[in-house]
């Protein structure tokens, strides 16, 4: 079995995120409310955005930031 973790904080796999996308999630925020992925350290938000595709990556994004970057990324992507 090839299990690729997107969110290691909550053990959410790529397959699970894709499933949520198929079920209608189209922003990282919606994925987060479905499976919590991205709601802890936030380091997986970019990967979630990549899985969502369609240029969901926020344009203005601080290169390295801890903490509030998650909320900012989720807000910009929503
Ligand atoms: S890896 Fe997803 S919130 Fe930390």
Image (spheres, grey):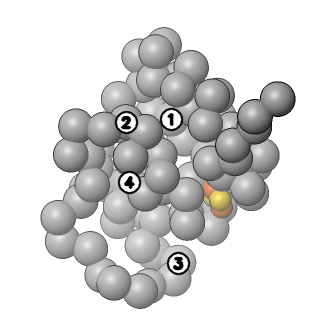
Q: Which residue is mark 1?
A: 31
Element on which disc 4 rests: helix
- Mark 3–mark 4 distance (CA, rounded to whole Å): 12 Å
Ligand 1 is within 8 Å of the C-beta of the residue at disc 4: no
Give percent across and percent down for residue 12. Answer: 70, 41
Residues marked 2 and 3 touching at CB (< 8 Å): no
- Mark 2–mark 1 distance (CA, rounded to whole Å): 9 Å
Give percent across and percent down for residue 49. Answer: 38, 47
Question: Which is nearer the N-term, disc 2 or disc 1?
Answer: 1
Q: Which residue is mark 3?
A: 67
Image quadrant of ligand 1?
Answer: bottom right
The 10 Å Cα crowd at callout 1, few under 14, some 14 to 19, many 20 or more, is many
Q: Which residue is mark 2?
A: 52
The 10 Å Cα crowd at callout 2, few under 14, some 14 to 19, many 20 or more, is many
Residue 14 found in image quarter? top right
- Mark 4–mark 1 distance (CA, rounded to whole Å): 10 Å
Q: Nearer the viewer, mark 2 or mark 3?
A: 2
Residue found 22% across the figure and 37% down from its top: 54
Ligand 1 is within 8 Å of the C-beta of the residue at disc 2: no
Residue 3 found in image quarter? top right
């Amino acid at each position: 079995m090839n299990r690729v973790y997107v969110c290691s904080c909550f053990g959410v796999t790529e397959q699970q995120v894709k499933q949520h996308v198929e079920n209608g999630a189209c922003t990282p925020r919606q994925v987060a409310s479905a499976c919590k992925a991205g709601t802890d350290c936030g380091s997986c938000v970019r990967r979630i955005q990549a899985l969502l595709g369609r240029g969901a990556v926020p344009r203005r994004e601080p290169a390295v930031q801890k903490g509030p970057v998650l909320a900012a990324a989720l807000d910009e992507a929503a």
